[in-house]
């Protein structure tokens, strides 16, 4: 997806989530009822940051594009601050921080699980490689043994033929 399209999609998702939270904040009984929208906000913020970082690494950055990305990120940050205030007023003073901490913990656990999966895949690949090496070694030894027995039988057979001829 093009950077502009991804950024627009992230902004649209964030705007929809913010509108939903603002409309429903007084009706919900628990934060879990709006957790999906909060998750959408975090995802949109992550995508905007990724796009801004991608644009920063490209050599021919357009000034307008980078300015738009910064302004959109600031606008989203401002709206998230507003959501933070609304959630803290509705559910208690540290609720937003607990949400952020839980989100960060979930991201850490996800990264750790991915790293563990990569380590496990590397371990299995190494195990398969070692199994293949051992199998080839055993097959090689068996082939050498068969070749030696064949050479022995041929030599014995030729020596018997020479004795008969002599």
Image (cartoon, rainbow, N blue to C red):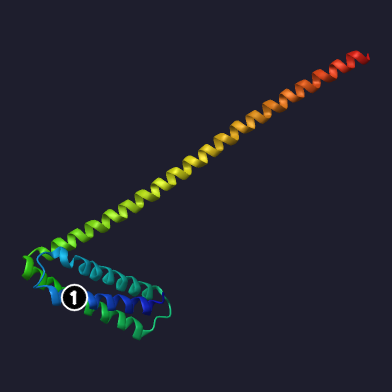
Find residue 11 and report its image quarter: bottom left
Q: Which residue lies at the image location 25% right of the left edge and 75% below the top edge?
A: 14
**Residue 134 higher or lower than 15, as above or below:** above
Q: Position of residue 94 (x, y in %)?
A: 9, 63
Question: Quick one: quadrant of the N terminus?
Answer: bottom left
- Extreme right residue here? 166
| Up/down of 88 relative to 66, above or below | above
Residue at the extreme bottom of the image, as rendered: 64
Please state which of residues 21 and 148 is positioned toward the viewer in this rendering: 21
Residue 127 point in image, percent of width and height = 47, 40
Q: Is residue 111 visible?
A: yes
Residue located at (35% from left, 83% from top):
65
In the shown orientation, is residue 3 left or right of residue 162? Answer: left
The answer to whether residue 10 is left or right of residue 37 is right
Name the foreground residue: 139 vs 13: 13
- Could one spot residue 82 in this view of the protein? no
Residue tagged 1: 20
Quadrant assignment, res 87: bottom left
Up-down relation of residue 100 to residue 115 (above or below): below
Residue 136 lies in quadrant? top right
What residue is at 37 percent from the left and 79 percent from the top? 5
């Amino acid at each position: 997806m093009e950077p502009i399209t991804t950024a627009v999609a992230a902004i649209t998702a964030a705007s929809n989530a913010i509108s939903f939270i603002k409309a429903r904040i007084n009706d919900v009984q628990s934060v879990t009822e709006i957790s999906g929208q909060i998750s959408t906000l975090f995802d949109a913020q992550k995508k905007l940051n990724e796009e801004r970082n991608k644009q920063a690494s490209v050599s021919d950055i357009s000034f307008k594009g980078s300015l738009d990305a910064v302004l959109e990120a600031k606008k989203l940050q401002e709206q998230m601050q507003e959501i933070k205030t609304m959630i803290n007023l509705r559910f208690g003073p540290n609720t937003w921080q607990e949400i952020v901490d839980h989100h960060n913990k979930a991201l850490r656990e996800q990264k750790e699980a991915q790293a563990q999966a990569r380590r496990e895949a590397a371990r299995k690949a190494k195990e398969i490689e070692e199994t293949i090496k051992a199998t080839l070694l055993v097959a090689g030894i068996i082939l050498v043994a068969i070749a030696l027995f064949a050479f022995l039988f041929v030599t014995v057979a030729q020596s018997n033929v020479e004795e008969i001829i002599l």
